[in-house]
Image (cartoon, rainbow, N blue to C red):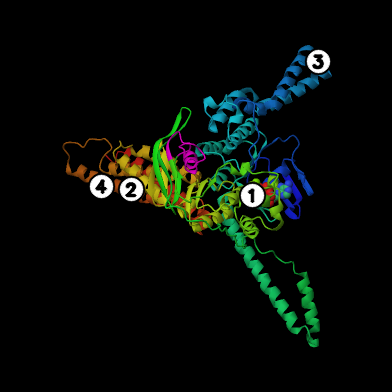
Amino acid sequence: MLTLDKVTKHYGGRTIFDSASWAMPDDGRVGLVGLNGAGKSTLLRIIAEQIQPDGGRISRPQRTRVGYLHQDSPEMGGRSVLDETLSALAEMREHDRRRVELEEILATDHSGPTHEAALEELGDVLSELERHGFYNADSRATSVLFGLGFREEDLGRDVAEFSGGIRMRIALAKLLLQRPDFLMLDEPTNHLDIEARNWLEEYLEDYEGGIILVSHDHYFLDRVTRRTVEVSRGALNEYNGNYSFYLVERERRFEADLAAYEKQRTEIEHMEAFISRFRYQASKAKLVQSRIKQLDKVERLQSPAGLEKPPTIKFPNCDRGARRVVELRDAVKRYGELTVYSGVSLEIERGSRIALVGPNGAGKSTMIRMLAGVDDLTGGERIVGDKVVMGYFAQNLAESLDYDSTVLDELSRSAQGMTSTEIRNLLGAMLFSGDEVQKRVGVLSGGERARLALAKVIARRNNCLLLDEPTNNLDIVAKETLLEALRRFPGTVLIVSHDRHILNQLVTQVIEVGHGHAIRYLGNYDDYLAKKAQEESRAVKDAPVARVEGARSRLTQVGSSVAAEGATNGAVPTTCVNGNAKAVQSTSLARAGGNGRKAPAVADHASDRRRSQNARKRAEIETVIERKENERAALALEMNDANFYLARKDAKEMIARYELLGGEIDKLYEDLVAFEDSGAAK
Ligand SMILES: Nc1ncnc2c1ncn2[C@@H]1O[C@H](COP(=O)(O)OP(=O)(O)OP(=O)(O)O)[C@@H](O)[C@H]1O
Ligand SMILES: [Mg+2]
């Protein structure tokens, strides 16, 4: 059991934890959630004993090994990926050396107290080595690295060659290799692509030890955790369920808190009105005195968290710039042997808001860098319009801030021609208020740093923004604030994001990149998905059709992955619509007798009638399946929205309906298969 007892922590004048208590069992699965800067990473540092609380106590069983993945990318270099990963086992190597020593002692001393002690210690050492999987470490290391997306040829490369995001993966691989009793992961999915994230999800589901997971990713939290602890206003509020449960339950608690708060406020107002009305009437003096005493005694409730109005960001005024913002003509981009673009022509018009989409590694970031002029082209031309000012937000921008500078100085350096009031307002919108602008960048939380990096881009009076994953590390309020600001921004926006909600609410065009090319679709992200689904279902119509059972198992897989993978991968809904299209296809063909059986040449009336009854029955089942599948696919699309829980009051009902439909569809397929197997369908 890990226990926190009345833990208090202050930074300067700010209270991060105010006598917070919490207990977690050794094999607990906890999601740690809260707004940027609430204190999640601080709590992990306190548990890992990297910082001391100002008051209170933390206790955990002796000899518990804690593994902690930090939110910031670690510094590494001078070793290959595989060696760096294996270096995580230094402690186990010590144990192994001790094992050899002990075995030597046992070989010479056959009895006596030295023998006894060595035997006992050897038992402990062996079980420790066994427990942490020391003897198959090499193969485990490679399997973890492959799971996290490394390829065979990467294993020998120096870690220094990789970006901060990839170094995070190496740090994660090291932790998983150590198999600590207690795993603390601070936003591990920020730098993972969908495959690596799915792999990690599965890995953690089977993990034997306890897990505390900090994340802003609903689906990942839902899959991995069973309890949720919210850090809010210095307290730790526990919820007995995963993130979906937390959202619904928090709403309920909020309503209850609000009702209690308002009731108390009305009572206080009544008392105050009574006091001020009768204060000077001698006949009421006693009563007034008693009310004053009563009022003093009232323990005033805090207004429930969530009532504060989120701030707004206002972009500084900018020039209009040319109608043709930027153009690529026959652009070619190669990195060594690898050709990313082999002749792309693209024109971006003023005022358009465009999402760049495509599978991981397709070249979205490369395209943004080419358009921004950060990367030189290998061939072709880049033409920038007159008076176009571009602001480029790179995924690693937050890392390149000057950690010794203050927040205010860091922003002032980038803010061209902004008055100091404008600068402070922008910082206020990014939730740096009052003294916080004097904070050193080095002490900022992950989300605060991401916001400062964004503010630096915004402050430059750009009329064209090129944003590569700008919402990583941002909490839900900050994401909404940014979205609103971008929607009001009169300039041009190109964005790479895994957040479907943002894409749908913002963009008017989608450019799909991949296979060296770029294809433009008009409309928002959902329109793009619908068009893709149409294209693919047309392709499926020409393809051979699977048997009903085949379609069913595929559907079950698709169904379960939709809710889990969620908003962060645009490809998911396509697969879902696709899966659905395939199923509809196969059932309608089955209805037409497409199961490969030949009709008998001669038939009597009775068997004709039976056949037509059976066909009707089967068609009935299939129609119901089709209807339910369509409904479920539509629900899945909505649930994939990153803001689904926030936007939909009936989220809980929708999830329940989604689950229910899944069960019903499975049952119907079972009926259909049983119906066919019983020979009734002959
Ligand atoms: N050494 C320090 N000195 C002053 N303030 C600090 C220090 N370390 C952290 N803080 C502040 O304490 C608050 C909590 O930080 P913490 O990193 O725990 O937040 P978080 O919940 O992890 O946020 P995020 O979601 O952005 O990662 C932040 O406002 C941060 O700026
Ligand atoms: Mg943090």
The reply, left or right, for residue 64 in relation to residue 481 is right
**Percent x, y of residue 621:** 33, 48
Count the marks: 4
Q: Does the numbered disc 2 mark a residue whose Cβ is under 8 Å from ligand 1?
A: no
The crowd level at tag 1 (other Cα within 10 Å; few <14, some 14-19, many 20+) is: few
Three-letter code, disc 4: Gln
The crowd level at tag 4 (other Cα within 10 Å; few <14, some 14-19, many 20+) is: some
The reply, left or right, for residue 596 in relation to residue 444 is left
Does label 2 or label 1 sit earlier along the sequence? Answer: 1
Does label 3 or label 2 sit earlier along the sequence? Answer: 3
Is 271 in front, or is 127? 271
Q: Nearer the viewer, mark 1 or mark 3?
A: 1
Does label 4 or label 3 sit earlier along the sequence? Answer: 3
**Percent x, y of residue 474:** 59, 49
Q: Does the numbered disc 1 mark a residue whose Cβ is under 8 Å from ligand 1?
A: no
Query: Which residue in the structure is indicated by mark 4?
Result: 613
Residue 619: numbered disc: none
Look at the picture and state if 592 lies above or below 296: above
* Secondary-structure class at tag 2: helix
Look at the numbered discs 3 and 2 and tell me whether their residues touch, using CB distance below 8 Å: no
Query: Which residue in the structure is indicated by mark 1?
Result: 413
